Amino acid sequence: MFENKERTDIAELGEFGLIKHLTQNFKIQHESSIKGVGDDAAVLDFSEQQVLVSTDLLLEGIHFDLAYVPLIHLGYKAVQVNLSDIYAMNGVATQITVSIGISSKFPLEAVEDIYKGIELACNKFNIDLIGGDTSSSKQGLVISITSIGHAKKEDICYRNGAQEGDLLCVSGDLGGAYVGLQILEREKLIFLENPQIQPDLEGKDYIIERQLKPEGRRDVVDLLAQLKIKPTSMIDVSDGLASEILHICTQSDKGCTIYEDKLPIDPVTYETARELGLDPTVCALNGGEDYELLFTIKQADYEKLKNDVDISIIGHITDKNSGCRMISKSDVVHELKAQGWNAFKK
Ligand code: ADP
Ligand code: MG
């Protein structure tokens, strides 16, 4: 992966030199970041606001495959998936810490690439890098990011607030990241069998981007604030729509009905799924990694959202005893099941 690049041994810099080298370009932008990198702990001040904290752990071979994930994208995505959790609470994300474990096969240039991706995401989403930890790793690359944000107490959206009659809404479109991954996996297998063959990704840019370069939906949080809508519940779509709907329904002690023909699926996702012999609806329900926001709103807020092309209303909340159901295009009732991505699957 790094053949064409210079290779500088990380040992030449030492741990402190490495940390300084990696973090020196990052600028602190928020008043709430009183102290960032450089002391034993960072110091933050959110005065009246409640503080949101979320962590993700990414392991090579479990969560990403360096055969087709460029390191810049990996850094970018690691930040985005983390910010997505803060947005899913209806919060403003302001800081991250980044902890990395790097095996000795990694030259400095590889770690620099990861940090370039982290920096891109921080600049684009206005985030301060305020700390982290650095270690060598015996097996594979490890990245753990913690994101910190804030919100007024009354604005925070939990998973458990959905009420009967509320409308279920989702931003963007679904299934693209999963179908993009299937294409990358297919091309990897072809490459391993015959390294002379160039990957055939033509026309698949959108879904490859959905897999490699997801964007947290801060814009949806802003839109909801502008429209003066406070969702009654919210969650981000990381494991798959069905799994996230079930989280909202279980925690809110409710059921739901969604409609297959309302699920937002991009044409490239749809066509490619078909090409691969996959059911586009199953990809949208169980694919995962879309990082869209799934939320419920009161019916009274319907008028404010109904014309927004980026938000789809896919169903509504019912009483618990009705269960969680999807009405298919041919009017058959299916029970929703979570078959989302599971890190413990054998
Ligand atoms: P400690 O010994 O307390 O763990 P370190 O020497 O590891 O402190 O870290 C020094 C400073 O650099 C701290 O502010 C820490 O948060 C920050 N830091 C360490 N590793 C990273 C990293 N990978 N990315 C960003 N900041 C880091
Ligand atoms: Mg340390």
Image: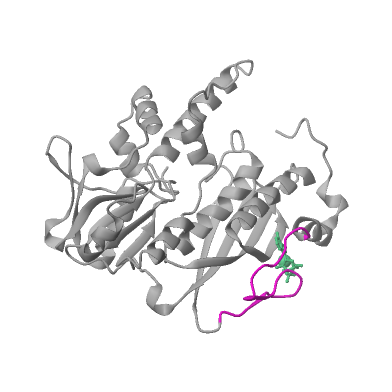
User: In the rendered image, is residue 132 in sight?
Assistant: yes
Relative placement, left or right, of 1 versus 189 is right
Residue 248, image x, y percentages: 29, 61
Residue 229, image x, y percentages: 33, 66
Q: Residue at x 57, y 18 (%)?
A: 193
Tell me the quadrant of the picture where the C terminus can be found: top left
Magenta segment main secondary structure = loop
Give the vertical position of 76 relative to 40 (above or below). above
Magenta residues, start to end: 24-46
Q: Residue at x 78, y 60 (%)?
A: 24
Give the vertical position of 42 relative to 176 (above or below). below
Does the segment drawn in magenta span residue 171?
Answer: no
Residue 318, image x, y percentages: 16, 60
Residue that protrudes farthest toward the bottom in the picture: 48
Q: Residue at x 74, y 34 (%)?
A: 2
Please state the quadrant of the image where ligand 2 appears.
bottom right
Tally of numbered tags? 0
Residue 8, image x, y percentages: 84, 43
Way the structure is coloured: one colour
Give the vertical position of 235 relative to 77 (above or below). below
Relative placement, left or right, of 103 versus 251 is right
Q: Nearest the camera: 160 or 66?
A: 160
